[in-house]
Amino acid sequence: MKTKSAPSIHLDPGLEIGYGSPLARFGQGVTLAGGTHFLLARNGRGKTTLLRTLAKTLKPVAGNFRTEGFIQYLPEDLRFDPEITPAVIFKMLLHKDKVSAALDLAKRIELDTKKPYGRLSTGNRRKTNLVMAEFSVKTDRGNILLLDEPFSGLDAFARQAFEEIWKASSVNVLRLVSCHPDYDSMEMPSAIMLEGKSANHFQEQGQTWSSLKARMN
Amino acid sequence: MRLFRLTFATIFQRKAWVICLFAILVVPFALPMISTATEKPILMQPARIQAAWSTLWVCALIWGLFTASREGETNAKTGIGEYFQTTGMSPTRQLLEIWLAMLAFIVPLAIITGALCYFTTAPADAKERAMWLVLNAQYVALFLLVVAPLLALSTALASRFGGITGFAATLGLTLYGLYGVGYLDNMLKVDENPLMRSIWVFSPHYHFADLTQRLYFKSGALPMAGFWAMTLYFSGILAFYLGLSRLCFRTRAAA
């Protein structure tokens, strides 16, 4: 039987990410523990590249990192077959004990689980993917969820529902969320920022998007 | 087996398999009715045999290979393959699960065809009937040994080169193995050529697995030694194609 362990990500100093040539370099080591961490950068600065590197589907250009926990990387463009419904997706991919809870959440966030995936709006497809990933979390060990732009297209109500889930499972699950925040007061106590060719970790209670934005060119 | 379940549900939900099932159940009865067999009742059984097995081949080669290639392409292009890979599911396992989901449709279709052929066209004589059963079982086995690796290859090629390539390459390979090899052999009988002979030798001789004519002319079951030799031959192709498929298979389309 697996023992429950806390999830973590350790990025060594000198870690470089990119496709052949480096997009960003970590000058200092970064350690992330359970909870929600944001990944911020302008377009094309390497958010997806970093997530893919941590998901081990892409090799780092240089340096090392370590992860502890069951990883799920949810690509921004993940899409299921247009003919199948979210209900079928949940039934096929989730443990049977979690299907009803997933369907309950879907109902709460107004996701029509009987509608074929191909006929869902962008936001509702995103909800389907997120529900699938959130309920695929393993309860017997630490988890790492790498979420690429999970909020794009999502309505405020659904976003709030997911943020509540994130708060409730912050010990067992480490979430690294790439996003483009859309309101200044959004709290981001832990954020990795890719700027220029360097990557830095900013950690502070009460830190908001407003204060972080000022650091971004 | 999450990817197996997802792929199985996806294929099931698309419902194209219903057309194949319908064709396999109806064509062997409907087609002979509009053929010359209606004028010569003695031709009814051979016509049914031909219709039943031809329908299965067409369904497997058109729908089966198309679906397999579509699944391979979808897995690589929609992020599903990458998602599963990050959860620890290796590319080998992904290919295996997609392949098994395809086989979950093809195997029953083959068994239904064999059973239908046995129950509706079996000779009255007990000895011939027993042989009929063996021949149909041999046909089902050889058919699956031919089609199964092609499904894996179709999935793998499509994941790397796109759905059209995966489908067209494996369909072309199958048609060549079923018919082209015979034409090549005829050409070599007229004009021997060492290079062409080597190509012929290393070609997949799928026509060995097509026992329709043997059923048609009631030639009896394959001798067991011959059957096992063919099983070994097609198992070798299966192993080779599975290895090739694994080399080609990608969980993520090239950036």
Image (cartoon, coloured by chain):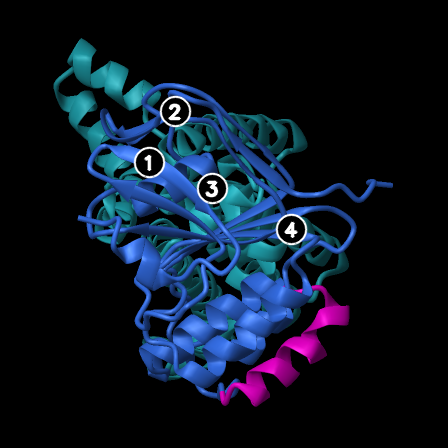
Which of the chains is blue? A
- A188, above or below B48, in the image: above
Q: Mark 2 points at which residue?
A: A15
Point out the tag, 3 or 4, that comes first from the N-terminus: 4
* Disc 1 residue crowd, few under 14, some 14–19, many 20+, Cα 10 Å: many
Q: Which label sits in the foreground, 1 or 4?
A: 1
Q: Nearer the viewer, residue A42 or A100?
A: A42
Label 3: state its secondary structure: helix
Q: Which residue sits at x=47%, y=67%?
A: A129
Residues beneath discs 1 and 3 located on the same chain: no
Q: What stretch is highlighted in magenta?
A: A94-110
In magenta stretch: residue A105: yes
Q: Is mark 1 on a helix, strand or loop?
A: strand
The residue sitting at the top extreme is B194
Q: Do the residues labelled 2 and 3 touch (CB within 8 Å)?
A: no
Chain letter of disc 2?
A
Between tags 3 and 4, which lies in front? 3
Q: Mark 3 points at which residue?
A: B146
State the CA–CA distance, disc 1 to disc 2. Answer: 9 Å
Q: Gap in Å between the C-alphas at discs 3 and 4?
A: 14 Å
Q: In this view, does A30 lie above or below B51?
A: above
Give the residue type that dot 2 points to.
Leu
| Discs 1 and 2 carry the same chain letter | yes
Q: Name the residue under label 4.
A: B137
Q: In the picture shown, does residue A210 fall above or below A73?
A: below
Q: Name the residue under label 1.
A: A199
Q: Judge depth for marks 2 and 4 and give the one in front.
A: 2
* Mark 2 element type: loop
Whether residue B67 is in magenta: the answer is no
Magenta: main secondary structure: helix
Q: Do the residues labelled 1 and 2 touch (CB within 8 Å)?
A: yes
